[in-house]
Structures are given as C-alpha cells and as structure tokens.
Amino acid sequence: MFKKQNINQLFVIASILFGAKTYVIYRFLFNINLENTMQEFILFINPFVTAFFVYALSVWFKPKHQTGYIKTVTILGSVILYLNLIFYRNFGDFLTIPILFQGSNAKDLGSSVISLLEWYDVLLFADVALIFYLAKPSVNIGEVAEKTRPKGRKLILSLSIVFLIGNYVLAEIERPQLLQRGFDREYLVKNIGLFNFHLYDIVQQSRSKAQRVLADGNELSEILTYIDEEATDRSTTDLAGIAEGKNVIFVWLESLQTFVINNELHGEEITPFLNSLIDDSYYFENFYHQTEQGKTADSEFVSETSLYPLPSGAVYFTHGDNTYQSLPQMLGESGYSTSVFHANNGSFWNRNVMYGTLGIDHFYDINAYNVTDDNTVGWGLKDKDFFEQSMKYLTSLQEPYYTRMITLTNHHPFSLDEEDATLMPFDSNSRTLNQYFQTVRYLDESLELFFDELKAAGEYDDAIIVLMGDHYGISDFHDRAMAMYLDKEEITPYDHIQLQRVPLYIHIPGEKGEVISTVSGQVDIKPTLLHLLGIEDDNELGFGTNMFGENRKDFIALRDGSFITEDVIYTKGLFYDRVSGELIEETDVLLELKERAQQELTYSDQLIYGDLLRFHDLNQ
Ligand code: GP9
Ligand code: MN
C-alpha cells in the first residue's frame, strides 16, 4: 500500500491520527466550555501540536527503535486519555497526581467503572490498531531505510518546539498568567492540553511535596510563639457570643471595593442598598483585602484560616491537601453544618478538593443550578438568579448552618445585559471602570433581593449575615480613569493601598451596629466570627485578631509586604500618614514594624510550604 519510506511518514501519520482523536475527545466527550473563537482555535491546534512534538522525538532514536517508540507513546497516550475520560464521566474533572495517589475520588470510582464505559469507546483505540498495522515491516511504512539526517532531525525538533511555543503564547494571550495562577483544570486543559496539564501538575506537586518532606516541625514552635505573643487577643468584649447558635450567611461580594460605597455617579448613589445597610450593621470602613494571585480563592483562604495567601499561585491549588485549622471545621465541631454556594465549575480554583480539606460539608456548584443562555452573563449565572435558585437549598440546610455564597456578576470585564443596567456607565478612557459601576449596582440590587427572600423564607431573623468584598475589581491599569472618577490628579502609591479596601458588613438582625474605623483585614475574619458566635477556643491560631478586641495586633500586612496601622501606611519603600496621605519620615519604630510584617508573611509561608500544622495538635 505504501512505498518503502523512512520513518518520517509514520510519525507524521501518527501525529495526525492521535491529534485528531484527542481533539474529538476534547470537543465531544469532555464538556469543555468554549467562550470564543480563539478558545476554539487553541483547543483545535493544541492536540496536533502536542502530538507532533512527542512523535517527532522518534527521529532521534536509532532506526530499529523508532517504530517501538511510536507504538509505545501511542498506547501510553491513549491509555492516559481514556483514564481521564472515565474519570471525567463520573466527576466532571481531570485526573491529578493527588487524586491518583491518595484521593478518595479514585476509590469511589472502583465500583462504578463498568457503568462509565460506552460501546463506542472501542473506536478511541482505532488509531492504535492502525499505527500498529502501519508499523509492521510487511506494510513497509514502518521499516526504516535510513536514519533521518542530523539537519533534518534538528529541523523537525525546532519546528515542533516553535509550534509548542506558539500554542503557549496564544494561551497566554487568551488567559494571562495561566501557569503561575493555575485557575482551573479546565482552563489549563483547554489552553495547553491534557498532557501538558499532567506535566504541569507533576511539577507543581513534586515541588510542594519536596518542601513538605524536608520540613520537620522544628520551625513550628518559633512560629507558634510569635502567634501567641503578637497575633492573639483573648480579651473579651460586650459582643462575645452575641450571635451564639445563629446561622451564618457569609456573602462574597465579587470585586467590590469600598470606594463605591456612599459614593455617587451622575448624581446617583451607586449602591443604595449597601449604603442603607450601614445603618443597622457593623460596617468596617477600613477593612483591607489581603489577596494575591489566587484572587477569590485567596480571599476564601485568608478569611477561613487566618493565614496569608502565597506570594505566587493559589494555595487552593498548590497546597490543597495540607492540614489547616479552618473556620468551617471549627464550626463543624461545634455542631454547625457547613456549605458553599457558587455557580461555577467545582474544579475552578480547585475548590472541589480544597473544600474537603477545609471541612466544608457540601458544595453547591454549577450543577446545582439551572443555567441557561437567558440567565447568564459574563462569567455565568447572574447574581439575582443565583440567589433566587439558592433559596430552596438554603432553607433546607441543617441548622445551625454556616454557609458562604459567592457572587459572580461583578467580575471583570463587568459585562451586563442592557435590561439589567439601571445606572448609566461612567465616561472615561477605561471601558472596564465605566462598566464597573453598572455591575456594582446590579450586585447591590441582587443583595436587596436576597435580603427580601431571606425575610420571606423566615431565614433572616435567625441568621447573622456577613458581606465582604473579596478583592479589588479595578487594577492599576485603569489608574487614569480612576483618578478622573475620584477627582484626583493621579493615583499615588498611597491611594493604591487605600483602594485595596473592600466593604465588610456584619449584620445581626435586631442589633443596631456601628461604623467602625479601626484598621482590619481578611486575616481577622476567623477570630472575629468565632468571638461573635461565642466559640471561645484557646487553640484558635492564625495571624488575625478579633476586630472588636482591645489588644489587637497593630498592623495589617498585605501580601506584597505593604502594611497599614492606625497611623501609618507603608508601601513601596515609603511611609505615609494613614489619614492625610502625606509622606512621613521613617523611624526605627516604623522600620521594625516593616520587619515584623515581613516576618509574619514568611512565617505564614513556612506553615504552608512545610505543611507544619500537621505536627501540631489543633485540639489542645
Ligand atoms: C470563580 C470566581 C471568580 O469561580 O470566584 O474568581 P476570581 O477571578 O475573582 O478569582
Ligand atoms: Mn473574585
């Protein structure tokens, strides 16, 4: 059938066959969400680019080993693909190293494997059969006449590397910082492919495992002493136990920053509901987010563990199976049922794994919701529909409950259907900022609706409702437009820090509340809520202190080493008066504080990298 050829033909045919098979699996058997033509394009080229790279390596083998190599990688690749497919059919997710080696997921699969197989799966191995046939000496194509010449080999290798880089560049354009931040397994797979995702996962996991193995708990006592002396406030207040036994409804306000609260656009309040809520809530006007690359996931992590996020990547991804002392776990031990509502893929930010680690009993992810073209915008289900559809689950939670509801509509790029916009956009050179006000207003309206529904369902009176902005929504990139809105000449480093304030409301029905101006941050959430719920636990540990306490730690550190005290803001090597924003001279006391903030961040990193809390008895 084929003329006697050298090996090049077989590796090209194998690349095309395997690439095509992988594409068919990505496109039709996995449920990968494609939002635009660029994503479609990347998903299409990636299987061929990767297959070409792997098969092209065959030209470096001795002729008699080339067919063996091609056959081996074909079988191996097909098996990896197929195992992922079976796993995906059950869990809607891709395989990872922790799942393979220690996760309970794989075990759960055992009994139901047969039901996950389909008759047409046989076809997924058709290319294997064909390659084996073509590789037979009698068919000729597999018989190598001579070794590819060195020049040819180098050319093929260079070409395959250029293709890979091209694929990566496109992925990076489509999703900046994809590899540093991880985001979601689905994002990784659709941008760099399943096989490169596995390599990425192996590198990530081995890096953190190595650090874990090298840690021996010796560092722990120094860190615990620091926490005990500097970051612990066991003083009591009038509010201790004020919400004892109540349900906790903790709403994550996507990308909401404090600068919109009690502020106007075109002479109109931007957030009328949130403004009015200040009157009967504890409202913290100098509350800072402390997130880094992991954005929402970081805000969840800091708030629930009182540890800092990592300098790069999302802890949710990189250290999803560490031992932590978390708020939900502590509440669980006090009889609370714990859950999270969020209408996104369960695997986004590795939540479906991390929530187990944090002791969250149930995760109502996208599968709990009815998501249609009409009720989605931007990142997914619109917030109003999200709250509405969540009510049936919320009302059936076992009491007392602690639940978090993560909103989504006020997310970059802040798109909104015209019929949902009740505020005119801002007019500046930044479309992002212009639209931001509109989605913020939408979020405000959806919260009002949610409060009404809680009242109608009889959930309101028995609950304490916490509302918190997760992180900034408007990055430095939009400084010019931001300065224009805030009526400033420019956004200085001081302004930048002040823009990292996010709203925090603690709303206890029946309580008057007050506006609190003391400086606080997400790291303080865990001890504060425990205090209000009357759960006094001497073993509680972390870098935050009760926000109502008398002996609070005297600074709030941001992840980049900036910090804020009642008097001073330190950032980018300069000290500012916190209130006036004027530059102030550095003093020994301030420099010492700067060292302490840095030390604290390092301690937190050590705890996470070494998984040190596994050496500590969290119950005594
Ligand atoms: C994703 C949502 C947004 O599920 O929480 O994440 P973000 O991009 O803000 O980190
Ligand atoms: Mn977010």
Image (cartoon, rainbow, N blue to C red):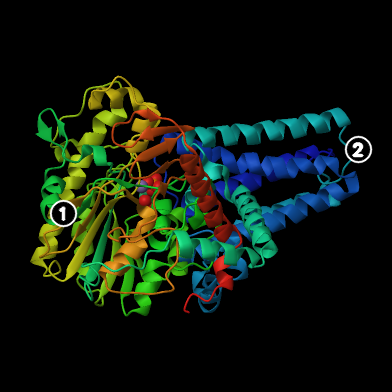
Give residue 556's position: percent from left, percent from top.
Answer: 40, 48
Instruction: Please give left or right for residue 430 compared with residue 95 in the image.
Output: left
Residue 492 lies, with reference to residue 404, above or below; the image says above
Numbered disc in front, either 2 or 1: 1
The residue that mark 2 highlights is: 146
The residue that mark 1 highlights is: 514
Mark 2, Cα crowd under 10 Å, few <14 / some 14-19 / many 20+, is few
Q: Quadrant of the N terminus?
A: top right
Give residue 51's position: percent from left, percent from top.
Answer: 67, 44
Q: Which of these two is toward me, 62 or 172? A: 172
Dividing the picture into quarters, in which one does residue 585 lie?
top left
Instruction: Please give left or right for residue 220 compared with residue 525 in the image.
Output: right
Q: Could you tell me if residue 322 is visible in this image?
A: yes
Q: Which of these two is toward me, 316 or 261? A: 261
Mark 2–mark 1 distance (CA, rounded to whole Å): 83 Å
In terms of sequence position, does the residue under pointer 2 or pointer 1 come before the other? 2
Q: Residue furthest front?
A: 588
Give the structural element (helix, strand or loop) at label 2.
Answer: loop
Mark 1, Cα crowd under 10 Å, few <14 / some 14-19 / many 20+, is some
Q: Amino acid at mark 1?
A: Glu
Q: Which of these two is toward me, 130 or 600? A: 600
Q: Amino acid at mark 2?
A: Glu
Give residue 500's position: percent from left, percent from top.
Answer: 35, 40
Q: Could you tell me if residue 135 is visible in this image?
A: no
Q: What residue is at 30 percent from the left and 19 percent from the top?
A: 489
